Structure formats: C-alpha cells, structure tokens
Image (tube, rainbow, N blue to C red):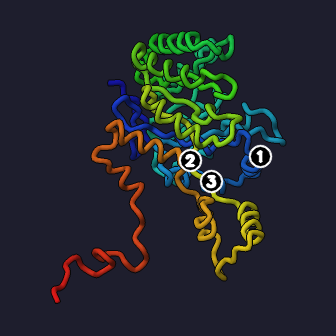
Amino acid sequence: MTRTVVESKTKTAILGFDEPFCVIGERINPTGRKKLAAELEAGDFSTVEQDALAQVMAGANILDVNAGVVYNSNPNPNETEPPLMTKLIELVQGLTDVPLCIDSSVPAALEAGLAAAEGRPLLNSVTGEEERLEIVLPLVKKYNVPVVAISNDDTGISEDPDVRFAVAKKIVERAADFGIPAHDIVVDPLVMPIGAMATAGQQVFALVRRLREELGVNTTCGASNISFGLPNRHGINNAFLPMAMAAGMTSAIMNPVALPVTQKKIAEKKAEVEAAGIVLPDGMDDETFVTLFGMGSTKPRAGSEMEAIRAANLLTNNDPHGGEWIKANKAPAAAGTEGRGRGGRAGSRRRRA
C-alpha cells in the first residue's frame, strides 16, 4: 500500500489508502485575508499563532504554511516571501509539534521553508509546467520530502479529466527521472466548483480512483472549491468529503475550524429575539445565548466537516474500535462531578438501604 510520510521533529502524519483521512489545515495563508496580510507586513503574528493552535485543537494532522502576502512597501515576493516563510515556519514549530506543509509559488520561499523546517515537511507544490518541474523537483530530491503535484501544465487547467490525469502521470514520470518515488507524490486532481460544472463531483471521484489504481499515488484537494459560489457551503462540503474518501482520496487542504460567532451576529440575533417578545434571563452570557439559539460558539471549535470526516473514517474501518469518534463526541464532565459514578454519586457502588 502507498504511504506518504510527513514528519515534524517529534510527530508523524501518514497519507495512505488504509490510513485515516489526513487533514491539512489551510488557515495560515494571507490570500484573501486583508487583515492577516496587513498584520504580517507589520510584523504582527498574533493571528498566525491563534490559527495554528485552533487548527490543531480542531484535529488538523498537518498545518499548511503560506507566506504569500504582497507587501505595500515592497511588492516583489521574491524578496519578501523567503524571510517571511522562515519566520512563519520557526514560529509555528515553536507552538505545535504537528508536521508542516510548505506552501508557495516562489521557489526561493520553498527552499527557505525547507531549510527552516524540522523533520520531513510536505512541499506545496509542483505543477506539470516545464519550468516549475525543473525548479521544484530538484528541491524535492535534495531535501528528500514529499510534494503536492497539481494537475495543470503550460496549457492551464483543463476541464477534461483525462487531460488532468495525463498531467499527473507526466509529473509522476518526471519525478521518477529524479529518483523520487511515486509514494512521495500527492496529486491534487483539481476540484472544479459544482456551481460552474455540474459534473465536477463525478469527475473528481473518477479521477481519484484512476490515480489510485493506475498510478498508485495519494491524493489531496482544496476541499472547499467544490462548493464555491453556492449557499450552505458546509452542507455540500460535508457530503463531498466522505464521497471523495470513499473514492480513495487520502487528504484535503481545508479549514478544520468552525469560526466563532461574531459580536455583530450576536447583536442582530438578540434584536430579533427581543422583537419577537422573548425575554431572556438577566446576565445570560454570549456563549449560552448562541448555544441556546443554535448559532454555534463564541470560541473556535472543530467544524462540521471534521465531524463528516471522523464519521467516514469510522465507516471505512480507519478508526479502530471507534476510538477517535467516541473521543470527539464524548460530552465533557460537568463541573464538580469528575470522578463520580452514575447519577453524580461519588464512587460506583450503590449502598443498600
């Protein structure tokens, strides 16, 4: 069986056909996050620290680290991204022991991340573009790391799944020329938005099966791409991930965290409740309020996609004896009842009258 090993200094994550699904946390990425981009340019890493810890708490097995912020003071990423990548890798390694995925389109930033990373990180990414192959594959060989292979080439991203498979095959074959084994190639077959292409789900499921059966490689994807532009994206993602797992997908780059309910949303809901004539108890805190009205939580927690993944791991026998499912769904003990038996009594025996 194909096994892709990703390691930190002290912990190992394995992608494999007979392994639990591997969640690669995507939140440490300034793309589309103006606030985070501004913080990074100012040397403020507080959001990075929060995102790293929240993702690990939610169940991420690997953390993707992307330093792709374009500085207002210097728009040249070839100069700004390598030192920022080094800083981010060192920072995240100091906070958590989960393995890392070094994510950049700038070759110098990839090498800076590889030099700073402890263990055996995952490199993200190489494509079928000739220039990219000639730059990235030597780095993969030099540092002996696995790499994400994205199924597009010099012609762009094809809507034809056969073309995307051919690009993946080309990357695997070119990697072999450098002495890189197929088990160190993690193919991203490129998930198209179902809102733009009705067959996108069917395409990726068929592609994943082919990649597994014909090339023997592990696979990943940007999980939320499937639901882009549609309402209730979590509902679509929650169905997509177990179906992709059943087809043979072994990992996904995704957000494992359900983001906290904002104060704006709480205020809007309280106004709605008040308008309906509902009187709330004096002193009700925000966490109790959002829980009562099914709004989520004021604190970061595991998202619903993680629940779907854990259930699928259980159903595919990749959660031995249901240990992870039970652990994730075990209600916390009420304050003051720790160590008590049934009914909150101290001890477990019943005393006879």
Residue 219 place in picture, x, y as percent: 48, 26
Identify the residue at image location x=45%, y=38%: 22
Amino acid carrying mark 1 in the image: Lys
> Which residue appears farthest toward the front when viewing the image?
277
Provide the secondary structure element on which disc 2 rests: helix
Q: Name the residue under label 2.
A: 90
Asked if residue 301 is positioned above or below residue 176 in the image, the reply reads: below
Task: Tell me the residue at 59%/52% (across/down).
Answer: 258
Q: Which residue is drawn at 43% across and 21% down?
A: 217
Q: Spatial distance from mark 1 to mark 3, Cα to Cα?
A: 17 Å
- Point out which mark residue 347 bears: none
* Residue 114 or residue 225, whichever sits in front: 225
Question: Residue at the right extreme?
Answer: 73
Q: Using residue 161 as the reference point, say whether residue 184 is left or right of it.
A: left
Of the 4 image quadrants, the one containing the C terminus is bottom left
Please name which of the two marks, 3 or 2, marks the residue nearer to the observer: 3
Q: Position of residue 77 (x, y in %)?
A: 74, 33
Where is residue 151 drawn, in percent x and y? 58, 18
Residue at the spot 62% in from the left edge and 45% down from the top edge: 28
Residue corresponding to mark 1 = 34
Against 285, residue 314 (above or below) is above
